Structures are given as C-alpha cells and as structure tokens.
Amino acid sequence: MPEIPELEATRGFFEDHLTGRAIAAAAVRIPVVFRTPANEFRETLPGDRFGRVRRHGKFLLFDLASGRVLAINPMLTGRFQYVEPAEKLPAKTCLVLDIDGGRSLRYADERLMGRLYLLPADGLAAIPGWAEGGPDLLDPALTEEVWLQRIARYRGGIKNVLVNAAFVQGIGNAYSDEILWEARINPFTPRTKLTEDELRRLYRAARDVIAWAIPLARAAMVKEDTLDDEERRDFLRVHRRGGQPCPRCGTPISEITANQRVTSFCRRCQPGLPA
Ligand SMILES: [Zn+2]
C-alpha cells in the first residue's frame, strides 16, 4: 500500500511533468473504481489542463484549470505510470489520460479497491470519510504539541494508533514499523503506557523517517522522465526484514502477523510485549 513517501514521490513527479499540460484524450477502461460518473471523466477531461498536484493523506489531488479536482486514493494496489503510449498496458489499467506532448498517465489497480473522483475544487468533502480524517502527518499545523493533544484521545497498541487515519493520515503498515523502530518503541505497547517523552520522540521519528524516505522512494520509482510506481522498498530498515540483523544492534528482526498484517521490530531496540 502506498504511504506518504511513495505518494509524495509520485506527487512531485507529476507536479514537475504535468503542471500546465493539457489532456488530449481520456479512456475509462474499468469503471468500478470511478466513484463519480465515469462518463464525465471520458467526456469532460479532454481539453482540460493540469494545475498543481497536491496530496492529502493517501489521496493524490490533481487540480484542473476548469476548477475541478481529479482525486485518486490508490488504496492497497493502485499504481501510476507516466510512459510512452506504446508501452505495454499493465493488467487492470482503469484510466488512461493521453497528455499533450506525447506521454500517457495511467492508473492501474490489481485488486480494484482504489477510488477515483472528479469533483469541484470546493467539493472534496463529498468524498466518504474525508471530513472525519485527522490531519496529514506533514501538515504544518500538526506541531509536536498538537500531536500530544491528539494522541491522548487514543488507546490501544501504539502501532494501531499510528495507522489510524482518524488520528493522523498517511502512515500505513510499512512506515509505522520504520517509525517505531526509529523511536525505539515497541509496536504493541499501549499508548497509555508511553511517557510524554516517548510520545514526543515518536513525533520526531515520524517526521524524520518520512523525510528520509521520500527521496529514496522517488529514486526507486522514477527513471529519468518516466514514472512506474510499482512498490520498491529495498531501503526499509525493519519492515519485512524478519530474521535479518537489526541495522542498529544486529539482533535478528522479529516478525509477527496479526489481522493479516505483518509487524516487524527489533526486540532489543524496542523492548516490551510480546517478549
Ligand atoms: Zn536493534
């Protein structure tokens, strides 16, 4: 599942390559992922022009000159491509936008769980769950003090709090493991057992890990002026590194699967239950 580093890398790439460019043609290939009428994508996108590309939580937001926004949440398996039109189409390609200048923007989604919307710029609140979501992790308004106030409302294991979009948006299963390792906090520790000092350390680790990962994600996904965002996370230090030595202390990384979710951590750097 793409998280902030992959989505920021994708956002930055599209902002560099799409802003100011017009859409020449739009093809809707698999309608199920379109949550506003698919015919509007097909009929009204050609001739429109890209503005800024923004991100909110796990949504990429493509501003359009018409005053609308193309909003895409890739969920578990959505991926973007920006390639020559002759490149082979990935399986389950849902949307193809031919861009003036000769490239194609493609959205493909193996499990078809992603969600695409075409909405007026002031109409994003129509997206289910939009209004209930917490701040984006990189939102400048999410200061360390605001983080402390907000996190006090949540109980349960700290990893579950980090991936809860009502608390903060943009962190998923992989980067929560990286952040907790960086902060030296056991993922299963209840939030109520963490000291203020630990919660402050967690905030700084969250911001630091994401800042560290964005350029690495971009380097993994972008080749010259082509984007192919199949997830490549060879640079991660603990997530799915079970059995490999912890990069800090050398202890083999532990891996626990619960609720179909893998949690990787170092028992020495991140002591606590389960022992
Ligand atoms: Zn360690």
Image (tube, rainbow, N blue to C red):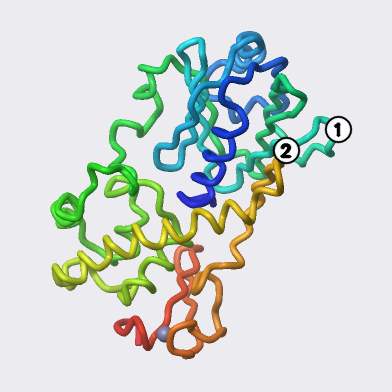
Mark 1 is surrounded, within 10 Å at the Cα level, by few (under 14), some (14 to 19) or many (20 or more) other residues, namely: few
The x, y position of residue 197, in whole percent, is: 16, 71
Front of the two marks 2 and 1: 1
Could you tell me which secondary element the residue under label 2 belongs to?
loop
Q: Which mark is residue 21?
A: none
Residue at 31% x, 84% y is 271
Question: Picture coordinates of residue 87 (x, y %)?
Answer: 83, 37
Q: Is residue 28 above or below residue 246?
A: above
Q: Quadrant of residue 244?
A: bottom right
Rendered residue at 69%/24% (across/down): 97
Query: Badge 2 is on which residue?
Result: 92
In this image, 59 relative to 143: left or right? right
Residue that numbered label 1 is attached to: 86
Q: Is mark 1 within 8 Å of ligand 1?
A: no
Task: Residue at 53%, 55% (x, y): give it.
Answer: 215
Task: Name which of mark 2 and mark 1 comes first in the sequence.
Answer: 1
Label 1 is placed on what type of residue?
A: Ala
For the residues bearing labels 2 and 1, Cβ distance under 8 angstroms: no
Q: As rendered, which of 151 and 256 lies closer to the eye?
A: 151
- Of helix, strand and loop, which one carries label 1? loop
Q: Is residue 3 left or right of residue 110?
A: left
Q: Does the residue labelled 2 lie within 8 Å of ligand 1?
A: no
Tell me which image quadrant ligand 1 sits in.
Answer: bottom left
